[in-house]
Every structure is written in C-alpha cells, then in structure tokens.
Image: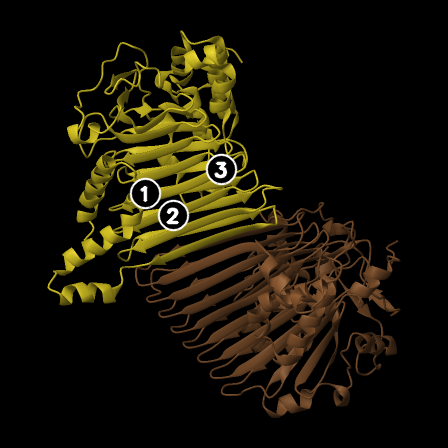
Chain colours: A brown, B yellow
Amino acid sequence: MPSLPNDNRLLRDYEHGFVSAVEEELVPPGLNEEIVRLISRKKNEPDWLLEFRLGALRAWQRKTEPRWALVRYPPIDYQSIRYYAAPKRWTAGEGLDPEIVNTFERLGIPLDERRQLAGVAVDAVFDSVSVATTHQKLLEEHGIVFCSFSEAVQRVPELVRRHLGSVVPPADNFFAALNSAVFSDGSFCYIPPGVKCPVDLSTYFRINAAGTGQFERTLIIADRGSEVSYLEGCTAPMRDENQLHAAVVELVAYEEATIRYSTVQNWYPGDDEGRGGIYNFVTKRGECRGPRSRISWTQVEVGSAITWKYPSCILRGDDSVGEFYSVAFTNRRMQADTGTKMIHIGRRTRSTIVSKGISAGESVNTYRGLVQVLPGAEQARNHSQCDSLLIGNRCSANTFPVVESENRTAIIEHEATTSRISEDQLFYLQSRGVDPETARSLIVNGFCREVFKQLPLEFAVEAVKLLEIKMEGSIG
Amino acid sequence: MNGEALIAVAPPGMAAAVEDRGAGEPVALRERRRAALEEALARPPPSPTDEAWRRTDPRRFDPERWPIAPAGPLHAAPDSPPNGALVEPFDAVLTVWAGGWSLADRSGVVRSRALRVRPLGEVVTSDPAAASALWEMAPSLGPRDRHELWALALASPALVIEAADGVRLERGVLVRSLAPPDMLWCPWLGVRVGAGAALHVAERLEVGAGGAESAAFVIAAIRFAVAAEGRLRWGRLQTLGRGALEMDYVFGRLERNAQADLVSLQVGSRAVRSRIGAEAAATGATVRLGGLAVGVARQHLDQQTVQIHAAPDTSSDLLFKVAVRDRAHSVYRGLIGARRGSVRITALQRNHNLVLNDGARADSLPGLLIDADDLTCTHGATIGSLDLEQIHYLRSRGLPEPVARRLLLEGFFEDILGRLALPALRTAARAAVRDHLAAMV
C-alpha cells in the first residue's frame, strides 16, 4: 500500500503532498478495448470519438516504448494502472464533494468565483474529471467556450471533431497514442474571431487517487485575430509509487491569433532516494495555422521524478512566430529531458528559444531541441539560447540541440553555456552583507529572469517562490 | 575464432585479406586483427533507422561492394611525383600506398634517431604497452563503429611515427597517402610524441592515380599519443576524387600539459564520414580542433567531433566551418564530454555553416555532456548564407558579384586555414579550397 513519507523536510519542500479523503469511482486496472469502451461510455461520447480512441489503442499496441531519452526508469506495467478515477460526488446536480473544495482551497485555487483572482477563470481537474469551471458566464458573453473536454464534446462536437488530433495525431508517438486511447478530462477552449479573452484561462490538474495515472487532453483553438493567455498548474500527493502523467496538449492559432501557454509544473518529484514521484511524459504541440499567428510556450518545471516533454511549434502560416521559454530545475534524483521543436514551414517565420536548466543534487538535466527550416521557409529566423547552471558536483547537465536548414535565406543561431554559480558574484553579494543562501537564490533568480518575465504576474511570483523553496538545502 | 572459421562467415575476400595482412606480423597483432574482424561481424550492419546513421545513408559506405586493396611488399609506389613546393619545408616525407611505404629523410632526423617511422608490428614487439595503447584508443562513448573495426582488421600499411623525448621537430613530417583507385583501402597511422617533444605532421590524402573523377573507398584510422609537455601539430588535407568515399577515425590522448593542434580540411570525395577527437587525459592538457568542409554537387559531408575532458585544468577549443551549395548536404555533430572530477576546465565549440542555394542542406548537432560542476563550457552554431550587405559593399567598389562572393567565402574559411602552422601547407590548402570554391560562385 503506498504510504506518505514521514519526512518533515520533504513535507516542507512539497506542501502539496497531502492526500484528500474523497470517495472515488475507479475502473479496474488494465488497458484493453473493453476499458476504452467503458471510459467512452461513462462520458457518453459519440461513435466517432470512440472510433478515435480505438484507433489510437490499436496504434499504441503496435508501438514500442521509446528509450532514446536520457532518463532511466524501471519498466512501466501499463496493465496495472487504472485509467479512470473520478470522485463519486462531482456533478453539478449532486453538488461537489466538500473535500474536493477543501483540496483546491489548500492548493490556493478557490473554486468560489468571488474569492478568486479577478483576472483568472479556472478549470479544476481532479484525477480523471473536471470538477468545476469558473467565470463561465463572463466568457460566454464574449462567445468564448471554456469548459471541460467532456462537456465540449457535447456542446461543440463539430469544433472538437475538426481539431482533435489535427496537431498531435493519435499515432504520433507511444505516449500520445496511449493518451488518445484513454484520455479522460482536460480543458477545451475556443476563442471566436477578433476576441481578446478578457481573463486569463487556467487549468489546475490534481492527481489524488493511488494506482492511477492522469491522461488529460487539452485543446485550445484561437480563431482569426483572437488572443488568449492560458495557465496550467499541477500537483500530486507524496507517495512511494510512481504515477504516470501522459497528457496531450494541442494548440491551433489561426490568422493573426495569439496563444500564450504557461505552465508551472510542480508534480511530486520523489524523495531523496528517488522513491516515488510522477513520470511526466507529455506531448505538447501548437500549430500556427494562419499567417501572422503566434504561439508562445513558457514553462517552469520544478517537479516530477522524470520530465520528458518538448512543447513545439509548427510554423505553417507565413510570418508566424513561435516562442519557447523554459526553466527546468532538477534536484535529488530527478531527471529531466526537455526542450522544444520549432518547425519552420511558412515564409518569414520566426522562432525564439530560451532555455535555462538548473541541476542540483544527483539529478540529470538535459535540454534537447530541434530547429528545422524546410525548403519553402524563406527568410526564416531562429535564435536559441540554452544555459545550464550546475549546483554541486554530483549532478549532470547536457545539451543536445539539432539544427537543420534547407533554405539558403534562413538565419539560425544557437548558443549554449554550462557553468556553475560564479564565485565572483557570490563574493560580491556576501561582501555586501547578503547571506550565502540568499545570494545563491538571487543569482539563480537572475539567471531565470528572462523566462520569468514571460509569465503572467501571479504565476511569476509563484514561480520565484517555488524555486526558492526547491533550492533550499540543495546547496552546501 | 580462428582464421579458418572467420573465412567461413566473413564477406568474400575479407577474412583472407585479414590473414594476408597478419602474415609475418607478431601473433599479438594478428590476434587483434582477427578480434576486430570478429567484433565487426558480430555487429548488425548499420541501418538508416539508427540514430547515428539517420542523416547519412549507410548503404553509401558498404565496404563489401569494393575489392580490397592488396597488401604486401610486391606493390610498387604509385606514379605520383610529390609537389616540390609542398615537400620542401619538411624534415621527412613519408609516402604511403596500398601495400607499401617509403620514407625520405630530408634533414637527417631519421638518421639521428630523433624521428622514427616503423611498422606497428615492430612496436608491438619492442613496446607492447605503447602499441596496445594506440591500437585500443577510442573515445569510449559507446561501442566502436563497425567501419572502424573493418579499418583495424584490414589496416595496411599500419605505421607508427615517433618523436623521441625532448626533440623539437617543428618542420615535421609530410605524410602523402595515395589511395588506390577503385578499391577499399584502410591505412592506419599511429603518432607518438615523446615527453617534452614537438612534432608537426601534415597529411595529404589523395587518389594515387586516375584524376579528379576517380573512385576509391578509404577508411583511415589515425591514433596519437602525446606525452607530458609534448606538442603535436597535425593538419590533414583530403582532396580525393569526386567518385571517392572517405571515412576517418582520428583520435588522440594527451598527458600532463601536452598540447595538440588538429586541423581537418575536407575538400574532395563524393561522401565523407569523419570522426575526429581528442581526450585531455591529464592536468593542463590543451586541445585545439579546427575543420573546414566544402560541399558541391551532391557531396555528402558527415563530420563528428569529440572533445573529452577527463582531468582538471584542461581546455579545448573547436571551430568547424562548412559551406554547401547545389544539392550538397552537410552534417556536423559535436560533443563536449566533461567527466566527473574534471573541474576548472574550459571547453569551447563553434560550428558555422553557409547554405549557398536552395536545395543544399546543413544540419548542426552540437552537444554537451557534463558531469562536473566547476567549469565553463559553451557551444555555438549558426546556419546562414553570405551577407547581402557585404556583397553589396564589395560590388559598390567595382568588384563583380562572383568575385565578391568568392572573396567572402575565402574570408569565411581564413581563420581555419590560419590554424595551419606551416606556410607551405597553408598555401597548398588555400589553393585546394580556392579551386573548390571556384565551382561555388
């Protein structure tokens, strides 16, 4: 039986590691056609979506698990995972389980709209289901659809059908196929032409039940000339077992639309010995489908036992822009193999990559990226900057970028550095009375500043605090 | 596995060629040749789906499609007179061809025993540890390449150049490697630089006869060991014909305070797959690596570099430049590896590429693999084309556009050519690059 580690430092470092006593409905463990049909039935899905799931299941069964990333983990028994877990009391009619309300309260995500930050609408996902979506009325006034994925399938089936799998096809990769077969809830968002979303949209993912994974699906569509900022947060209880999180996020930006997607990922990273923690194997991809569209990914990765993801942009529309800003912090025995892909297809497409990796403890932190300029991408432009900071002598920092150009007018620049915290900077700060721990924290925050300033203010403040907490004790 | 058993499973002629080369050599070397062949046969052939071969079709480099160059003393030197201006500044000229070699002692350094050139078999007998260190030397980043194992098994001639402790041969040795046309040839060269010694080795690899269009398949292995306080300067100009294939495995190890300046110039061949690298194995070792590659028509240039830091206070600095046009495709992979404990190191890696027309392609895969904390490692990669503003500037001063382009290309490569220490080699290299660039503008 998984247990909660009785370690005060761990609890302080990971205050979100509690378990909520929520009565849940669980499907039997295992993955087969019957389970997929059961999930589809529970969500009352149309036939085309069931076919989508079954096709993905067949693709997944044909695939072998990839092993090329610089991460090590024991074989995952996919037949021992429960692919659906939902609180028994969560629908509007039955009223929300007070324990769920308390859980989100403790996580700092009040589901009561009056007490929320004025500028953020939240979709709260608890295990396999979305339990609440706030500010619906305000959004509807602007024609914006922001709801759980299951609800969107019922409300706007044609929109979902046209876009689902259009950026990340069901057979794209092993984990995307797995997600496409068993995905439970997630968020759906559609911004109509010309609308600038009046509030930031946010989804908070919480894994609670043991022996499960989370396989949410997020689809964001920004129609012509629209603009949206989307924030994603996530936490899970501390357990000795590893839990799998295999999500798929698809973004579609039409002509002159802008999507900003920000993530503060704080899944449980496991203890000092590497026991427990979330395997965060996620496929995130956006397509700038129309001219002059823009997709910007910002991620702050401070959790998970293993992070393995590459938020990407397909720059199809002429003059479209892709951006990737990332801070990946690893400590203890955490492993991260993360980066981005920028695929330049349209003319005059531009992309920017800023990646900051910080390794401490015995962790392994790897940046892996691809910048690809296809023959038609005239005057494409890319600048990539990947910096790594090492704290301690038992960690590793690796950088594996790939740059491909098939167009003579393209200009691509990549630079990377690896170093440790400068002794000169430390000395300078300490000579002005700053204690060593604060000095290191200041230097690390400065190192990450370029990424933090891309985040909405509330998220930036949270990210800075989170990094400070995570760094405590990691430096000798 | 014994020789007869190998003959049963090896490709036609391969095992016999290995046995043929081993005849007359010490048993230890013969056994190593057999072991290399056995290991190569045990490996699955490279496939286009392997990560290491995804960008270079391994079918282009199939040794089984080529007749193996004969070995043995019966074959005379090909009729290829050395270029006088190039030969002039060297202490010695070593000419190597399939089945033989000759050494011209131009300033008496061989007579005085400051410099020695001898078959690997002799070194195996007189100094087995040194021979073994050269033969077994590898970047230890995974199992050896199948082609490298072929090259070891079929090595001929296998020679070792040695500079005695403390001697300073700044004029050095010119190695003329003359590939036999229409054959698979695997020359092997070891270089030992003694403690406190300085040696300059300049190699020119060309096809022995047959002209610019001639075909050949060369898999060359070069190993160097630089002892404490020693210094090696090594430059290599490859001007094989447009029908040729070339693979090379160049790797060396540097001891305390040793220095190595390595420059690789790839101008010829239809397809190249080159691996060049060095390990700074002891405190204070310094490695400088430079390279240029010029690709036209359908040339394929796949170059890999490795900078390994296995000791504190070591440094490395790499600069590789590539220009491609027509349908040429270049692939550059670079790796800096810092082993645990290699603190206070500085490792730099730069790769700059010019894509001169649509249809040409450049891929750059720089990499850092860092397991130590107190260090500074950087890499930079760029892909672009000639600067239109610079072309405009030169044209506005009366230069025709082709001349302006050629000047800019020559300027682009000049800092690599400037790394060649000997003026004569620099001049020869500049001429070879200029000839190749003339087709580009």
Residue that mark 3 sits on: B285
Which residue type does callout 3 highlight? Answer: Ala
Question: Which residue type carries mark 2?
Answer: Leu
Q: Where does residue A165 sit, x and y in percent of width and height?
A: 56, 66
The foreground one among A423 and A258 is A423
Are discs 1 and 3 less than 8 Å apart at CB?
Answer: no
Tell me what residue is drawn at x 57 percent, y 75 percent.
Answer: A453
Judged from the image, the secondary structure of the residue bearing numbered disc 2 is strand
View extreme (front): residue: A431
Residue B163: give x, y in percent of width and height.
38, 22
Residue sitting nearer the eye, A91 or A212: A212
- Compared with B85, A174 (above or below) is below
Disc nearest the viewer among 2 and 1: 1
Q: Residue furthest bottom?
A: A141
B60 w.r.t. A273: above or below: above
Q: Is tag 2's residue or tag 1's residue first in the polypeptide sequence? A: 2
Q: Is residue A90 left or right of residue A394?
A: right
Quadrant in which residue A116 is drawn: bottom right
Describe residue B34's horizontal placement relative to residue A475 as left or right. Answer: left
Q: Label 2 belongs to which residue?
A: B319
Tell me the tag on residue A90. none
Write down the chain letter for disc 2: B
Mark 1 and mark 2 in contact (Cβ < 8 Å)? yes
The alpha-carbon separation of the residues under discs 2 and 3 comes to 18 Å
Q: Are marks 2 and 3 on the same chain?
A: yes
Query: Which callout, 2 or 3, points at the residue further toward the start of the chain?
Result: 3
Write down the chain letter for disc 1. B
Mark 3, secondary structure of its residue: loop
> Quadrant location of the N terminus of chain B?
top right
User: Is residue A154 in view?
Assistant: no
